[in-house]
Image (cartoon, helix red, strand yellow):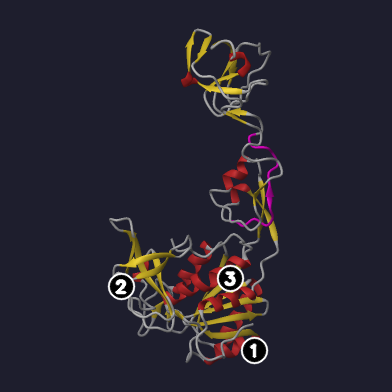
Amino acid sequence: MGCCDTPGLMPVSAAIETLLENTASITHSEIVSLTDAQNRITSEDIRSPINVPPFANSAMDGYAVRCADLASTQTLPLAGKSFAGVPFEGNWLQGTCIRIMTGAEIPEGADAVIMQEQTTVEGDNVTFTVLPAAQQNIRPIGDDVKTGDVVIPKGTLLTPREVPLLATLGIADVPVMRKPKVAFFSTGDELRQVGETLGKGEIYDSNRYTIRAMLEKMHCEAIDLGVVPDCPEQLRETFLHAADIADVIVTSGGVSVGEADYTKDILDQEGEVGFWKIAIKPGKPFAFGRVKNALFCGLPGNPVSVLVTLHVLVQPLLAKLSGHTQWKPTIPLKAKAETRFKKSPGRADYQRAVYRLDKNGDLVVGTTGNQGSGAFSSLSVANCFTVLEQDRGHVEVGETVTIEPFNAVLS
């Protein structure tokens, strides 16, 4: 387990690497109905039990023909109809055609469908204005999916793109990973619940709302253990209880230098925890380790620091824990700064910003204002982070910067 007793700050990439190295995916799976499969992660490859389509069908409204019948004539009498769900039945005589609708089963012997726009009809006689190519407008059996094909790999998050596919295949029950259980709480005597009246020196605890909202977007079972005061025995009991009921413990507050020493003492006694200083702004103080068999992530106390560290550091950990093998970090983009960004070298700075396309179609980005770690209002109007490199200083208007548009967790 990594620890930051070494001097200096740990780069963000090194912190993420250490977090992932010490995280193993959940192995327990369960079966859920298709109606409950949304936002769950597949625990095995899902193979198709059928061909799609299960029979050759028409890609057009038109007429099914045998190409050979049009070798000597352009006009064929109508022999019958094939509709979706009501296929043509009976003997199909040579030298005739069959009216067919999109999705309807191709009559045995047909080797082309001519769209109705390429015909003229007089009574029961159909005249074709073009000669068809073999297999024209015919969707063959298994054209989309073949029996046995892996349609959804193990470790895929099921979204509105995948769930209808499973329905198409007639799959009613889906094997998925158990959701990670994450117990979280805030620490501090100054914290009050929303709805209470604030006393002198007190503030509302917004961090648990941030953590819950993000955990649920990360497809975890969020277990809110409330606010724990600065009381060693109560803090110890809460940590041990959390470790008994959850895969991961997430706290806010109590990990900065100068904060109550008993937080560190309890964690040293009950688990294996390192207190890190990470080269990230906001969010430098961070703790990681284990309490009993549960992973532990200690976040800073400032509201924006909580969100940034949960997004940048904890999100990859939870993705791996959940078995979400298809998860990828947000793809960074390059944009031109249309405002000045203040920064001092030393830490990678995740600044709240708004990106857009200018009149020339170029990507530009501007700050949302106050970048203090307690200024949540500038985050509520942002749609991206401008990620300023660790060694970079101030950014002037017109310079190129890297942005990370908010992903589904923050959107």
| Residue drawn 71% across the image and 44% down it | 148
Q: Is residue 270 magenta?
A: no
The number of callouts visible is 3
- Compared to residue 113, the image places residue 251 above or below, namely below
Measuring from the top left, give residue 159's x and y in whole percent.
55, 52
Q: Which residue is mark 1?
A: 269
| Residue 94: % across, % down | 65, 11
Mark number, residue 317: 3
Q: What's the distance in space between the residues labelled 2 and 1, CA to CA? A: 43 Å
For the point 60% across and 51% down, the residue is 36
Mark 2 Cα-neighbour bin, 10 Å: few <14, some 14–19, many ≥20: some
Q: Is residue 46 magenta?
A: yes
Looking at the image, residue 107 lies above or below residue 212? above
Is disc 1 in contact with disc 3, using a CB cutoff of under 8 Å? no
Residue type, mark 1 in image: Gln
Residue 52 visible in the displayed image: yes
Return the x and y of residue 193 as percentages of the image width and height. 43, 74
Whether residues under marks 2 and 3 lie with C-beta atoms below 8 angstroms apart, the answer is no
What whole-number distance in Å separates the C-alpha atoms at marks 2 and 3?
30 Å
Q: Which quadrant is the N terminus positioned in?
A: bottom right
**Of the residues under marks 2 and 3, which one precedes in the sequence?**
3
Is 219 or 56 nearer to us in this picture? 56
Q: From this viewpoint, which residue is outermost toward the top?
A: 123
Q: Please rate how many residues cluster around mark 3, counting C-alpha atoms within 10 Å: few if below 14, some from 14 to 19, many from 20.
A: many
Q: Which residues are magenta?
A: 40-53
Residue 227 in view, yes or no: no
Label 2: which residue? 369
Q: Helix, strand, or loop for circle 3? A: helix
Q: Could you tell me the amino acid type at mark 2? A: Gly
Nearer-the-camera pick, 99 or 259: 99
